[in-house]
Amino acid sequence: MSAMLRMLTRGRPAGTAALRRACLGPSFARPAHVTRSSPCTASVNIEDIGKQCSFTESLAEQLNFGNHAFAYSHKTSKELLRGLVVLHACAVDALVNHSYKLLTFGERMLGEKLLGYAVAPFYNQFVAGDSEEEMAVVSRSLASVGVRLMVAPMLETDVGEGHDLEVMYRKNLDKTLHLIDVSRRNSVLQDSRPICQTKMTAHLSADILARVSAAYEALSEGGRLEAVRALAEAMQEAGEGSSRTLSPLTHPLDPLSLSPKDVQEVLDSLPRIYKLGERSVAQDVVLAVDAEYTYTNPAINLLTLAMMKLFNTPTPIVWNTYQGYLKAGRENLRHDLRLVSSLKGVGFGAKVVRGAYLERERSRAHELGYPDPVNDTYKDTGLVYDSMVEVMLREIKANPRSRSVIVASHNESSVRTAARKLEELQLDPLAGNVVFGQVYGMAENISVPLARSGFVVYKSVPYGSVAEVMPYLSRRANENRAVLKGARRERQLLTQELLSRVIPSRSAPPLQ
């Protein structure tokens, strides 16, 4: 046992024949356009390997997501062991179901400092830290395997959650602006823009967004286009400090039938939201606005489209998020593409996700007696998701300078399908208008092969203190329990890699 522990505390020996075989895989060939900015951290000469390999297969066909030695070559054995333990724990329903209660109880009994020690394995697995120095360490680690940073602030509210809103808004604005700056300063790979994510519920309450959503949905498509134009006009006036005083009685939001109080709330939010777009343009950082619940998403789309009109001229700096687990996922995307096309000269960026709110959406639909908005089966979600990605890829083929997409998926089939379609349409994988994304702490077996094969890849990296982040992660764990329980393949790969380090002769064939 002591010998095993000594092996686990050391990194994987580099330069071995086993690692050479791992990097090659059954069909690995270095594409001609992979840059030198993503060196292999193990002492394997990728240039030499490429010279020995066949170039008959496409990049998509070369992707091998079952190669544990290649995927985890940049990870220490301690990190692998932690990941294995954490992913096993996340597959336990009882732990996930009661995680928030356990966190609250733990903080009350132990205090924040001791709780931090208790949850450190989970925190360190999924979170970069709460300082710029820690973020810089993570950014350099990701860059060593050609992966880029996509910062995720832990800021959101839901309907009915009470807060001192004005204090919360100021704090959230300051933190988001800071993280836009941090994203730029810690962008190690300079050949593409860093990405910073945000949630509209950090800047305008979910209750207001729900009411604006109802008003926006009641409009025709032409009415929604006018609402986007009107909101963009109001946002620009508010952000630039126009001499015209906006009030519930003198405002350009007539297309929306809102109460004077709700109009005032929206108007008050516009200077904050304008500053986010302004800072993103100044720092050349993509601002990716997250989708949330179906009852707030229409308002989020409205605000984000208004930002696009102001700041995507035509380079897509502001991106919106579209959820493939919704039956209306593809139409939601196509609807907003039609609106942006009507605005003329406006760029459009999309983050395409499967979605993280499945259980809440289904239970709410059942409670309130309206049709379930979520696809009936996982297969249906896959079909919708893949069709949404194809919509965006075809848009990019037609408008390469003014359209962008991030294929945010842990599903190997969807990632491979997107890579094939990208090549079929003869899109440049290094142009930066088609990129891939996974969550930090998971799916290394997807991210690393993608990056090493010449695709642009990001990791969504949460940032914040234990008190800020753990409740957020608890909520995400509940919503993503199917993904966490489905990480069986990843646990197998971690186990194989650990065993191959402890017993080098026992190097199992990579999973296909």
Image (tube, helix red, strand yellow):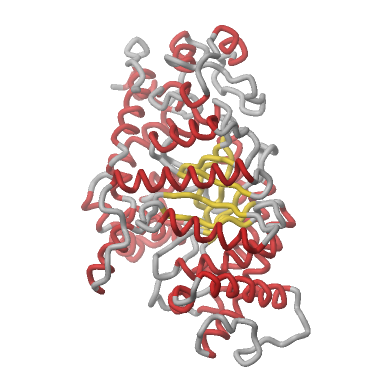
Q: Is residue 435 in sight in this rendering?
A: yes
Given residues 467 and 410, the one toward you in this image is 410
Q: Decide: is 251 above or below 368.
A: below
Locate residue 470 relative to residue 343 in the image: left or right. left
Quadrant in which residue 179 is drawn:
bottom right
Q: Residue at x 45, y 48 (%)?
A: 388
Q: Is residue 11 visible?
A: no
Residue 444 percent across, percent down from the top left: 45, 33
Above or below for 259 versus 83: below
Q: Residue 266 sits in which quadrant?
A: bottom right
- Camera-nearest residue between 136 and 56: 56
Q: Nearer the viewer, residue 460 or 328?
A: 328
Q: Position of residue 458 (x, y in %)?
A: 54, 41
Residue at x 39%, y 53% (from the top left corner):
355
Furthest-right residue in this view: 243
Work out whether residue 349 or residue 159 is closer to the camera in this orientation and state it.
349
Query: What residue lies at 55% left-to-right and 57% top-to-bottom?
Result: 337
The image shows a total of numbered marks equal to 0
Residue 294: % across, % down: 39, 66
| Quadrant containing the N terminus in the rendered view | top left
Identify the residue at horizontal 62%, vertical 58% (top origin): 341
Find residue 204 and report its horizontal and vertical position in percent.
52, 74
Q: Quadrant of the C terminus?
A: top left
- Relative horizontal placement of residue 155, taking residue 378 as reference (left or right): right
State the residue lying farthest toward the bottom: 249
